[in-house]
């Protein structure tokens, strides 16, 4: 787990709230990915400035009953990187 990494959406991709579907979606030139609530909450914090530790801290504060989200956030971010949704920002 690399809590110091900073991620951003891939160029040309954007996160948007879709009122008709009542969920976040990830828009890209060829289409759209419908996100569940957890994925939307995580990606809403991926801004190219916040590191993974700050994202985890924010989600832990928002959802204290979850009992710690670091592993789940790491799994999701790794998967999103593998799928090409995110890229690592280099300082």
Image: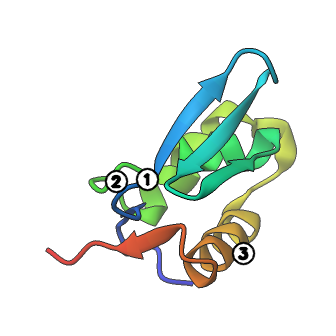
Q: Residue at x 54, y 67 (%)?
A: 85
Residue 62 found in image quarter: top right
Residue 76 at what x, y percent from top left?
A: 70, 68
Horizontally, residue 9 falls left or right of residue 40, namely: left
Which of pointers 2 and 3 lies earlier in the amino acid sequence? 2
The answer to whether residue 45 is visible is no
Q: Any mark on residue 50, and which?
A: 2
Residue visible at 50% across and 52% down? 55
Label 2 with label 1: CB-CB less than 8 Å: yes
Q: Quadrant of the C terminus?
A: bottom left
Per the image, label 1 sits on a secondary structure element best described as helix
Mark 2 or mark 1, which is nearer to you? Answer: 2
Task: Compute the Cα span from label 1 to label 3.
Answer: 16 Å
View extreme (left): residue: 91
In this picture, residue 57 sits left or right of residue 23: left
Residue 26 - label: none
Dot 3: what SS? helix
Label 1 sits on residue? 54
Packing grade of label 2 (10 A; few <14, some 14-19, many >=20) is: some
Rounded to the nearest whole Å, what is the CA distance between mark 2 and mark 1? 6 Å
Residue that carries the numbered disc 3 in the rendered image: 75
Q: Residues within 10 Å of mark 3 (few under 14, many from 20)?
A: few
């Amino acid at each position: 787990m690399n809590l110091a990494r900073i991620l951003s959406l891939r160029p040309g991709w954007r996160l948007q709230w879709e009122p008709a579907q009542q969920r976040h979606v990830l828009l890209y030139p060829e289409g759209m990915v419908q996100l569940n609530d957890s994925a939307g909450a995580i990606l809403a914090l991926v801004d190219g400035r916040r590191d993974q530790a700050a994202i985890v801290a924010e989600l832990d504060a928002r959802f204290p009953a979850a009992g710690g989200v670091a592993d789940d956030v790491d799994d999701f971010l790794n998967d999103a990187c593998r799928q090409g949704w995110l890229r690592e920002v280099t300082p």
